[in-house]
């Protein structure tokens, strides 16, 4: 994780949105069917309709009625392509948009819980890899930090509050990108002086852990913990050290480590974070063994 404001002269902002089938609460069910990206530097667009599975004639109903039902006729009409082709086209376009060591920063609403992990998952299915120099910035977190007491911080909620009208053609990627651009331009007075954390590809935002907010994220970053992965690595190291040196059990070691890292936070907040982190470790041990899966194809 890096602070985007420290690289302001080097960043190239790409506001993007994905449309996908599946339930975002179960990421493994999600498959991209549309992507749109707006390059702020050159005012240019990349958009593509993606075929999530050529073998399917019908697709599952969306989790909420506001999202359009994906149909095979639509994909055929739009000349939808598989994700590996779309991703190669996107990567080439981004490379053309970024020169002289510029850092591509992809901005989307709720990116750390939806767009970014879905991108990573889709690439994994096709044995593709997101470039290591791609960073991601969450406009949802930024809006929460800059707009107090908005109530509804969803993209549609913010747009309605700021502009007093709904998003035209909502839940199509290009329309949602345009709405996000307008919201951020409004918040920044069109200066685009964004502030906050940006995470590289394959680094999980600390704020994806429930109860970790801006203050906890900043506190952890100041202690050198810059992602969920680095937090879990530190916990694992301390668990082994504490058992060898002091005979301390795993949960006690985790409690001690988090208490030391998060000292400025209220005790109740630390307890809540500790419970969540402990449950996450119980379900998914942090090990390379659990990262290995068989891929499909990418030429």
Image (cartoon, helix red, strand yellow):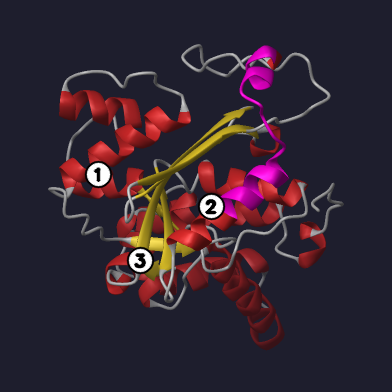
How far apart marks 1 and 3 lie (CA) works out to 16 Å
Q: Quadrant of residue 156?
A: top left
Residue 79 included in the magenta stretch of the image: yes
Q: Residue at left 19%, top 48%?
A: 146
Quick one: label 3 or label 2, which is nearer the N terminus?
A: 3
> Would residue 215 be found to the left or right of residue 207 on screen?
left
Upstream in sequence: badge 2 or badge 1: 1
Q: Nearer the viewer, residue 227 or 156?
A: 156
Say whether residue 102 is left or right of residue 248. left
**Front position among marks 3 and 2:** 3
Judged left or right of residue 8, residue 164 is left
Q: Cα distance, mark 2 to mark 1?
A: 35 Å
Span colored in magenta: 73-91
Nearer to us: label 1 or label 3: 3
Please tell me which residue lies in front, 109 or 90.
90
* Badge 3 element: strand
- Residue identifier under label 2: 275
From this viewpoint, is residue 262 visible?
Answer: no
Q: Which residue is mark 1?
A: 184
Q: Does 26 appear in magenta? A: no
Quarter of the rendering occupied by the N terminus: bottom left
Q: Residues within 10 Å of mark 2 (few under 14, many from 20)?
A: some
- Specify the principal SS of the magenta part: helix
């Amino acid at each position: 994780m890096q602070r985007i404001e420290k690289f302001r002269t080097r960043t190239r902002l790409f506001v993007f949105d994905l449309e996908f089938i599946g339930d975002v609460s179960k990421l493994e069910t999600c498959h991209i069917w549309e992507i749109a990206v707006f390059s702020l530097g050159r005012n240019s667009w990349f958009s593509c309709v993606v075929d999530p599975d050529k073998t399917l004639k019908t697709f599952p109903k969306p989790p909420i009625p506001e999202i359009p039902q994906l149909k095979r006729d639509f994909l055929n009409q739009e000349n939808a392509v598989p994700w590996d082709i779309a991703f190669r086209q996107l990567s080439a376009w981004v490379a053309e948009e970024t020169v002289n060591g510029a850092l591509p920063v992809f901005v989307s609403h709720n990116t750390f819980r939806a767009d970014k992990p879905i991108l990573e998952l889709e690439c994994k299915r096709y044995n593709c890899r997101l470039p290591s120099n791609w960073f991601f910035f969450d406009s949802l977190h930024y809006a929460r930090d800059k707009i107090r007491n908005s109530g509804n911080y969803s993209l549609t909620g913010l747009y309605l509050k700021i502009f007093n009208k709904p998003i035209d053609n909502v839940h199509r990627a290009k329309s949602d990108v345009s709405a996000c651009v307008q919201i951020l331009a409004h918040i920044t007075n069109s200066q685009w002086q964004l502030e906050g954390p940006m995470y590289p590809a394959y680094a999980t935002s600390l704020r994806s852990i429930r109860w970790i907010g801006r203050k906890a994220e900043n506190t952890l970053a100041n202690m050198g913990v810059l992602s969920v992965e680095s937090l879990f690595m530190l916990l694992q190291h301390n668990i082994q050290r504490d058992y060898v040196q002091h005979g301390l059990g795993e949960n006690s070691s985790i409690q001690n480590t988090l208490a030391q890292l998060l000292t400025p936070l209220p005790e109740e907040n630390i307890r809540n974070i500790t419970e969540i982190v402990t449950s996450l470790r119980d379900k998914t041990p942090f090990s390379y063994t659990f990262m290995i899966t068989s891929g499909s194809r990418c030429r």
